[in-house]
Amino acid sequence: MNELPDDLERALRDLDAQAARRASRVDPERVAAHVMARLRAEPARVVARPWGLPVSARWVGMAAAAAIVVLAGTMARSILWPGGAVGVAVPVLAQGIDSLDVQGLERLLQVAGEVRPSTAEPVQVSVSGTWDDLSEEQLRAVLQAVQQSEETKL
Amino acid sequence: MGAPVTTVADDGDLIARYLRGDEHAAAELVHRHTAPLARFLAIQGAPEDELEDLVQDAFFRAFKALGGFRGGASFRTWLLAIGSNLLKDRRRRWKKQMTVELTPDVADRSGDPAGEAEAGWTAERLAEEIARLPRLQREVFLFRAQQGLEYGAIARGLGISEGSARVHYHHAVKRLKERVR
């Protein structure tokens, strides 16, 4: 290479020739076979994380969102029909739920804990919004609170 | 009827195919990059009896981490950087072997006894001095001087700026010139 003084370049060429001789003893077929076998035994984790959360936190988030959907529907029905109309489907559009801060969520859960629906009929609810902004701890707290609320009802 | 047209898939295509589950694409990548990777590791003193294992491990780690490969760097430079990290991790084990193994196998310069003696001495010293270079200087120097990579590719592969790659190369050459006479 022209960038190097002659003696250095010559030494490098010699050294590289030596390295190339060693490298030639590495069999690409054998390498490929071993690597493929290892990859089959331990597949690559190619996981897309569009929300930028660790996978575990994502699952917690999804579970929390599902639980809140049921809870919010139950609350809405209890408020709108205190007598407990059986078999009524209540669509609740919880817009902007992801904009709630921690205090907001706590208030929501507090209210949820006070609701005592008279029936256990399922309610159809749709929720728009994501939970990206919640930390894993916050999401766990939400789940825990929902679980406690459900246990109280039972 | 014309001759069949053969196209050679670039590394990006092969990576995409592998990520979709095509093992042949991964095998093609291994065939394509084994020799440069092995040469890169060998010139840094990887013992011959561990060289293939080291190459396998580097490929395995590269494929395992392909989900995080953004394609800004070439697969080659990315793979070499992974190999370099592995080498660093294992270097302690080999430290004593390195210089010993590099000594006896110097290039044949038949017909020029004086040149042979000079080349032998210089190659040996060069191996020692390359091993003594700070890591970034060593990697940039070998990426450039041995692998023939452009500064831009080196910079992307090592996660540094192109200017920084040039500076590291300059310092490496200066240091080697001072020490290898």
Image (spheres, coloured by chain):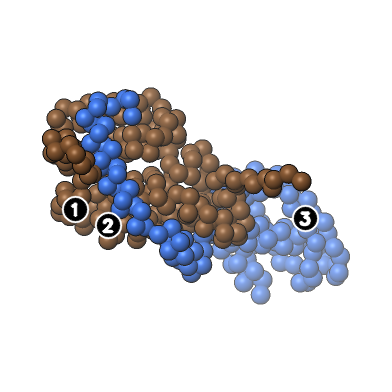
Chain colours: A blue, B brown
Local packing at callout 1 (Cα closer than 10 Å; few below 14, some 14-19, many 20+) is: few
**Residue at 45% from the left image edge and 49% from the top image edge:** B33
Q: Does residue A86 lie above or below B86 as drawn?
A: below
In this rendering, the label closer to the viewer, 1 or 3: 1
- Distance of label 1 from label 3 (alpha carbons): 70 Å
Quadrant in the picture for the C terminus of chain A? bottom right
**Residue at 66% from the left image edge and 62% from the top image edge:** A67
Instruction: Report which quarter residue B149 is drawn in.
Output: top left
Chain containing mark 2: B
Q: Secondary structure at mark 3?
A: loop
Chain containing mark 1: B
Q: Which residue is mark 2?
A: B48
Image x and y of residue A106, in percent: 59, 53
- Distance of label 2 from label 3 (alpha carbons): 63 Å
Q: Residue B101 bears which disc, if any?
A: 1
Quadrant in the picture for the N terminus of chain A? top left
The amino acid beneath tag 1 is Glu
Disc 1 to disc 3: CB gap under 8 Å: no
The answer to whether tags 1 and 2 share a subunit is yes
Chain containing mark 3: A
